[in-house]
Image (cartoon, rainbow, N blue to C red):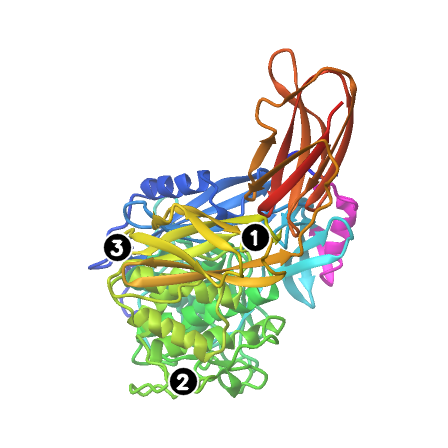
Amino acid sequence: MKRIAAFALVTTAAGLLVGLSPTTAAGASPAADPAQAARGADRLVDAKPPALYASAKDAFQRDKVVEGQGGLNYVSYTRTYSGLPVYGGDFVVVTDAKGGVLSTSVAQEKVLNVGITPKISAEKAAEVARAQVTEATGTSTPRLTVIAEGTGRLAYEVVAEGTNNGRESKMHVFVDALTGEVVEKSDEVVDGQGNSYYNGNPVTIGTKAPNPPTTTTYSMEDPGRSGIRCGGQNGTTYTKSSDSWGSGSGTDLETACVDALFAVGKEWDMLRDWLDRNGINGTGGGFPARVGLNDVNAYWNGSYTNFGHSQDNKRQATPIDVVAHEFGHAIFQTTPGGSTGSNEKGILNESTGDIFGALTEHYANEPAGLDTPDYTVGEGVNLVGSGPIRYMHKPSLISGNPDCYSSSVPPMEVHAGAGIQNHWFYLLAEGSNPTNGNPVSPTCNSSTVTGIGIQKAGKVFMGALNRKTSTWTHSLVRKASLEAAIQLFPGSCAEYNATKAAWNAVNVPAAANEPTTCNTSGNDFSVTLNPASATVQAGQQATATVATQTTSGTAQGVTLSASGLPTGATASFNPSSVTSGSSSTMTVSTSASTPSGAYPITVTGAGGSATHTATFTLTVGSGGGTCSGKQHTATGTLSSGSNAYQPGTSGFQVTTSGTHTACLDGPNGTDFDLYLQKRNSLGLWSTVASGTSAGPDETLTYNGTSGYYRYRVYAYSGSGSYTLGYDAP
């Protein structure tokens, strides 16, 4: 059945060395009132536009509002289906400084339609999750979840903690609630690699002064950057009687903490001054660092960063790019959509760490030491004795790391796969043939790319991260970054063109509904269709909602048209012109002479200096239906999620007891439902029989008494024309 509808900071004088306090960057655009941004986004969400793929069983909850660059705000939402959380159903609404909606970032691709009764127990799901780590110490309580895969997949979400192949692990596992198979798993503990004792001498870090009588010692806790502190493996912050820290030795752990605090302090300031982000977590907070890990590695475990040492044990892994890499994972985790998910999302997470490492190195611009600005990863720590662990300008310099995207990348080991987005970022920042001393970078399509500089590239990348959803792919990053480039640099197309050229140069394919053009007027819009296809019999109609959104600048008039129609078919729009941000209903009508076949219909929106298209695939059958020979026949056309009453809302009268039979013939490829309702003595209608199987066609039979009856036809998913035939006593 279906549903019911420091570097060694060696100081020569005692005293508190405090880092910079967060301030608004000079010249930064004023941010909107978050409450105003949220109101604008909530109005859109409450309307449940087609772009959100909402069903009657969906509910939305606003998560948070993050203020970003250029007065933009990013309002993230989570989704539930029949009260269950939906993994992959989250989305982000981007608003301007006045709370006007600019765009939405939605990974879900279909309306959900899934049963919510599991066939395996929660205990079994926990057992399956425990088996995903080599030594599990415990699991969370399994949580029943709907995965936004196709029309939905019921699964348990379980976190298994312990160690995996000797390393700390917090493994998030989704277990199919019907079959018990592992749908997806990802480790919250993110491996990294790095360098250390690195930044010249002396350096200034933020430390906390004694506060008698409560404390009488200094501590390696940054009072100007909430949550930033450093200590050993037990999590206790290092303290001492003086405010002079570290010996400058590569093996000294106190020195390692100096380097870690120096690096994360520079990253914090870079986020503030270049990217308009408030702290590591976006809301003015950060996370602790630990040093002394007995491993040739460094990692972020979801709560703190942890740093080990080089293979020859001569250096701690705390250079700028490694520290910024690990805290980059924290940024990835605290932007919308979180950090757990598919292997491809893990690849993009690793690359995110590398990009923040490069951004922080360039912001710090250390003239001395071992970590001067570049686009190599881990060159200072020389982790395993073979130099950098990744090259952003040409990833293939490391064996097994591809320069170009292909279908083999998403399942690849995450550090190797990180090269694709790294390569894109280098091309965006520096171009393919830099003239500033940086190396030449190959392109996969033999194109020449002109860079926009690392600061602008960072803005585009941060704008994309602020649109991240729980399901994240290279193509979705491409789409998000193109939207960011348009919205962050209104009136200029150089940033959009470079962003697109860099993605093309690494062979990342375009995403559906990504911006395809830029115009210098600063006003632009997008066009999307829901549904994007329909199947009808010759002589029937299909409908779709044509949704437009303002992607940059101000709203503008958009005129709609359609081309590529088959013989005998026409298309109309109601209304034929809209203001971007509004929707129209397209009706495609076929005739009895329309030949069978599949037809790609191009829907065009023209407004100002911009024109955008979307494709509607119409499949026409040979005609005929399964409902014939009935006393009464009614026809109509429905769009997805709508319903109609036949022969009308007031129904029809039956004066004797007997059997009702009905047959519904809906468009192929849809899911239409049929309900028989009867009016009671209070004048209220209640359902007495229904046909709710999965598919376009339904039948029902009901033995009833005299009274008033009516049929309700409901388009659960899909759109098009239907025929209802029914017999009454």
Mark on residue 591?
Answer: 1
Confirm or deny contact between disc 3 and disc 2 (CB under 8 A).
no
The kind of residue tagged 2 is: Ser
Q: How many marks?
A: 3
- Taking 198 as reference, is 232 above or below it? above
| Crowd tier of the residue under label 1, counting other residues whose Cα lies within 10 Å: few below 14, some 14–19, many 20 or above | some
Task: Decide which of tag 3 and tag 2 comes sooner along the chain.
Answer: 3
Which label was assigned to residue 23? Answer: 3
At a point 40% along the width and 57% down the height, the residue shown is 561
Mark 1–mark 3 distance (CA, rounded to whole Å): 66 Å
Q: Residue at x 34, y 54 (%)?
A: 559
The mark closer to the camera, 2 or 1, is: 1
Label 2: few (<14), some or many (≥20) within 10 Å? few
- Image location of residue 36, percent across then percent down: 32, 41
Residue 559 visible? The answer is: yes
Identify the magenta region.
115-138
